[in-house]
Image (cartoon, grey):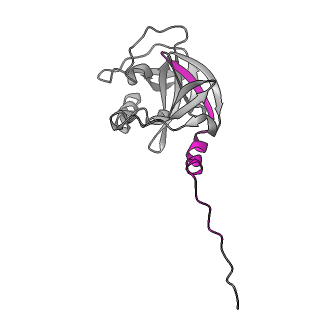
């Protein structure tokens, strides 16, 4: 009588291990900044430069949150006021107000864009345990640009996927404005 070798069954994936790849992919370095009293953060790999507010050339017939374009070392860069994009009130600029120049993907080509924020806070190194999925606020408040929520020093920082803050149509419009 011969016995067949037994093949062990794979372990069942628990909810925590099923979510691990997504959380792991979000771990890394983030640049945090303020808009009003809220703290946000974007992946450092997207950041190209942090600068003061230079003269911005307004472009007619663009949405109110697109403040215009700047000349950054010979390259025309569109500038978006993140406060206005998120529906917050416009406030007076201070010495801490700055532009974060980010690189986002538009199809296969990278596009640079300036994002006006109230103040840059710090660079954070986040591990998977620091990051949670965005709570479900209902279908009417879906925000695809929310990457997750980071728990840092007893506070919550909102992680943004800066490449999805604008829709593909808006990005195409910005690319056209920037030439």
The residue sitting at the front extreme is 1
- The answer to which of 173 and 119 lies nearer the viewer is 119
Is 150 rendered above or below residue 105?
above
Is 94 rendered above or below residue 35?
above
Q: State how many labels appear.
A: 0
- What range of the chain is rendered magenta? 8-36
The residue sitting at the left extreme is 61
Is 130 rendered above or below residue 14?
above
Q: Is residue 136 in view?
A: yes
- The answer to which of 97 and 23 lies nearer the viewer is 23
Residue 39 image point, x, y percent: 53, 22
Q: Quadrant of residue 47?
A: top right
Horizontal side, residue 64 vs residue 54: left or right: left
Q: Quadrant of the C terminus?
A: top left
Q: Quadrant of the N terminus?
A: bottom right
Residue 21 image point, x, y percent: 58, 48
Horizontal side, residue 34 vs residue 179: left or right: right
Q: Is residue 111 in view?
A: no
Give yes or no for residue 164 being in the magenta stretch. no
* Residue at x-position 66% and y-position 31%: 125
Q: Quadrant of residue 84?
A: top left
- The answer to which of 149 and 108 lies nearer the viewer is 149
Residue 100 image point, x, y percent: 53, 23
* Residue at x-position 44% and y-position 8%: 92
Residue 154 image point, x, y percent: 61, 24
Horizontal side, residue 147 vs residue 8: left or right: left
């Amino acid at each position: 009588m011969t016995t067949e070798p037994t093949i062990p069954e794979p372990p069942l994936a628990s909810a925590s291990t099923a979510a691990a790849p997504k959380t792991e992919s979000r771990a890394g370095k983030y640049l945090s900044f303020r808009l009003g009293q809220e703290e946000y953060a974007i992946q450092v790999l997207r950041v190209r430069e942090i600068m003061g507010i230079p003269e911005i050339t307004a472009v007619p017939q663009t949405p109110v949150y697109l403040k215009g374009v700047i000349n950054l070392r010979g390259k025309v860069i569109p500038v978006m006021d993140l406060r206005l994009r998120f529906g917050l009130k416009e406030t007076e600029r201070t010495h801490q107000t700055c532009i974060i120049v980010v690189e986002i993907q538009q199809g296969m080509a990278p596009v640079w864009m300036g994002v006006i924020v109230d103040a840059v806070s710090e660079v954070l190194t986040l591990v998977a345990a620091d990051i949670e999925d965005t709570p479900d606020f209902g279908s009417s408040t879906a925000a695809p640009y929310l990457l997750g929520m980071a728990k840092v020093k007893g506070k919550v920082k909102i992680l943004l996927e800066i490449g999805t803050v604008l829709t593909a149509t808006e990005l195409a419009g910005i690319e056209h404005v920037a030439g």
